Image: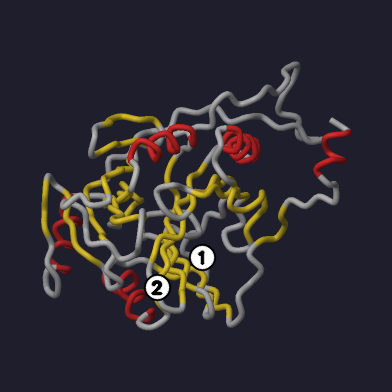
Amino acid sequence: MAIQRIESVTYGVEDIDVCLRFFTDFGLAPVEASAGHAVLETLAGQTVHLRAINDPELPPAYEQGSGIREVVWGVDTQEALDAIIAGLSTDREVRVLDGTAHTLDESGFGIGFAVAQPRPIQHEPRQYNVSGHVRRWNDAHGPISQVRPFRICHVAMNIPKEGREKAVAFYLDRLNFRATDIVEPMGVFMQAEGDLDQHTFLLCHRPDRAGTNHTSYEVPGFDDVIEGGNHMIEKGWREARKLGRHTIGSNVFRFIHAPCGGRVEYAADMDRADQNYETKVHQETPPHHIWALQSNKTQSESESHA
């Protein structure tokens, strides 16, 4: 195995302070902050980097405004990293800086590779009671004071429809990702070789533009998805999609618009897939979700029954 997980995501942003506040509210832990660079991390030790949009150290921009400029993938060994560098150096420039290799993929997205530095997640899961399967006695649930995402579980990027086959083949053929679900009108869901999530990466087809779609963060459970979204709204951030459960991947989700570009997702109960999972090809786009939160109450009715 080689690629294990997402190691870091770097954004070029118009306002580092605002984006730092956003991700802190979201539940990431700040570890560094300066005028031109801020770093936050997940419980699993992955990092989110925020750099000024005109920082010369960033890969070239492919969209207007703030957005993802590089995704660094964590590999299992130095030997695997060396092999990736050697393979990609045959047809593109690869720069190695402080142990991380940097290059561009077929869509012009910054992509990097480093030896993974996973951190064990210390967490006691909430216990839920179901008749016949009681897990919690003499103890009441309370509110979650601050949702703490375990890890970045996947990244989704938009790519132009023209050239999409070549863009996808780069990850499948050169980096040993495998396609788990191919949605012909919409995009390709891919799983990294050393990951168990149903998808680690998604390339979404768009008519004519490349750009940031979203990053997804695993949280412990449904309460964290719901309370995390509520907390972000209370802090003044704008919800992008209501609570629901995806069709592909099955995870419960809630999306928030991000000032760093695109959206971020709280995700729980994602499908896991091993080699017995056969690639599914969808000629038509499946429904986005199995269910989504609905209400037939107006705002005034909700307030009158509060």
Query: Residue 276 bears which disc, if any?
Result: 1
Q: Is residue 241 left or right of residue 160?
A: right
Which residue is drawn at the image coordinates 52% and 75% (left, top)? 186
Counting residues from the start of the chain, the first of labels 2 and 1 encountered is 2
Q: Secondary structure at mark 2?
A: loop
Q: Is residue 130 left or right of residue 281?
A: right
Could you tell me the amino acid type at mark 1?
Answer: Asn
Which residue is drawn at the image coordinates 31% and 55% (left, top)? 71
Give the answer, above or below, for where 163 lies relative to 297.
below
Quarter location, residue 246: bottom right
Q: In x, y percent, where is residue 195?
A: 41, 54
Which residue is drawn at the image coordinates 83% and 38% (left, top)? 302
Q: Along the line of sight, which residue is nearer the eye, 222 or 16?
A: 16
Give the answer, above or below, for where 295 lies relative to 199.
above
Residue position marked by numbered label 2 in the rendering: 209
Q: In x, y percent, where is residue 15?
A: 34, 42
Quarter of the image with the N terminus is bottom left
Quarter of the image with the C terminus is top right
Q: Secondary structure at mark 1?
A: loop
Which residue is drawn at the image coordinates 73% and 20% (left, top)? 140
Crowd band around label 1 with a 10 angstrom C-alpha radius: few (<14), some (14–19), many (20+)? few
Could you tell me the amino acid type at mark 2?
Answer: Arg
